[in-house]
Image: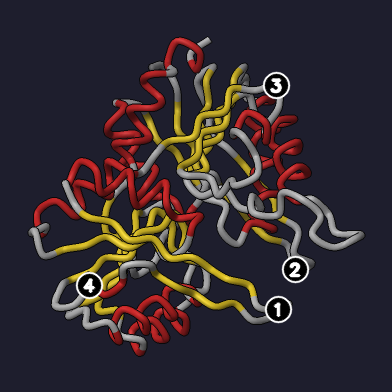
Amino acid sequence: MIATIHHFAESRQAAHRLADLLGINCQAVNVRRFPDGESLVRVEDTQRTAILYRSLDHPNEKLVELMLAASALRDRGASRIVLVAPYLGYMRQDIAFQPGEAVSQKVIGTLLAAHFDMLVTVDPHLHRTASLAAVAPGIDAVAVSAAETLVELLRPEITSAVMLIGPDAESRPWVETVAAPLGLQVLVGEKRRLGDRHVQLEIAGIERVQGRTVVLIDDLISSGGTLVRCAELLHAAGATRIEAVATHCLASPHDLAKLAAAGVARVRSTDTVAGPTASVAIAPALAAALVRWAPTAAQ
């Protein structure tokens, strides 16, 4: 692949890991902020294909700077710009749940499609949307699975006493995909809505966790509220140790403290989002996807 990766400051380590695997150059996007909050963005020389690397957690300021960087790269001569956003924010609001709400998935997807020629992300939080291509119309859109990365993270410590738990129905695809190559049993929770603000969580077959280590598997840990309730139920059912593993972890230190207080002994995630839980690099999965799409990306 003939390309250059351009990264923002918070993505430096992750971007360099990807660049090393691809054997291409990696350069910083320089950002200076004026007193009024505006950003001045400057990029270095690039190849015809420029890869912009930035995870879109806490996305508002990041999105503006991405648009500025994309424009600057076009001015530098890039004819094709690929956005690698390992975590893609604004995906869960895919319909207007209340009258007058903006459908942020559609707005942000259309915005990205207008500025980039290709979008690569990891396990996007899509539920009612059929594919990433529907989010970013008219451009190449690649959703990379972190399942194999999570499998390899877990494999060295797996025994027959371990059981994987999906905290709710939305987690089922992830927990089953991770469990299959490890030969592990799976339980999946189910939420029952009892009112506007009250949700009851049940896990069918939970009695099977007695005396066992359990690992909660999901694509996204946001505030961790569902995992806290799961942990309470699992402890009450006799689980001896509870851990959590996810593709993305957005949880704050306060959220992680609540998980620990609920008995979750360890929380791990990929490095799609930087933070204390980032335990395994997503770069190999991203590199494989980019190499697979190299004929398109190098045009």
Residue at 67% x, 31% y is: 134
Asked whether, in this view, residue 111 is left or right of residue 209, the answer is right
Q: Quadrant of the N terminus?
A: top left
Which coloring applies here? secondary structure
Residue type pointed to by label 4: Val
x, y percent for residue 224: 47, 74
- Pair 2/1: label in front: 1
Is there CB contact under 8 Å for labels 2 and 3? no
Q: Which mark is residue 209?
A: 4
Q: Which mark is residue 132?
A: none
Chain-order first, disc 2 or disc 3: 2
Tell me the CA gap for discs 2 and 3: 37 Å
Is there CB contact under 8 Å for labels 4 and 3? no
Chain-order first, disc 1 or disc 3: 3
Q: Secondary structure at mark 4?
A: helix
Residue indicated by mark 3: 138
Residue indicated by mark 2: 35
x, y percent for residue 181: 20, 41
Chain-order first, disc 4 or disc 3: 3
Residue at 75% x, 68% y is: 35
Tell me the CA gap for discs 1 and 3: 40 Å
Residue indicated by mark 1: 195
Crowd around label 3: few <14 · some 14–19 · many ≥20 (10 Å): few
Residue type pointed to by label 2: Pro
- Pair 4/3: label in front: 4
Asked whether, in this view, residue 215 is left or right of residue 85, the answer is left
Tell me the CA gap for discs 4 and 3: 47 Å
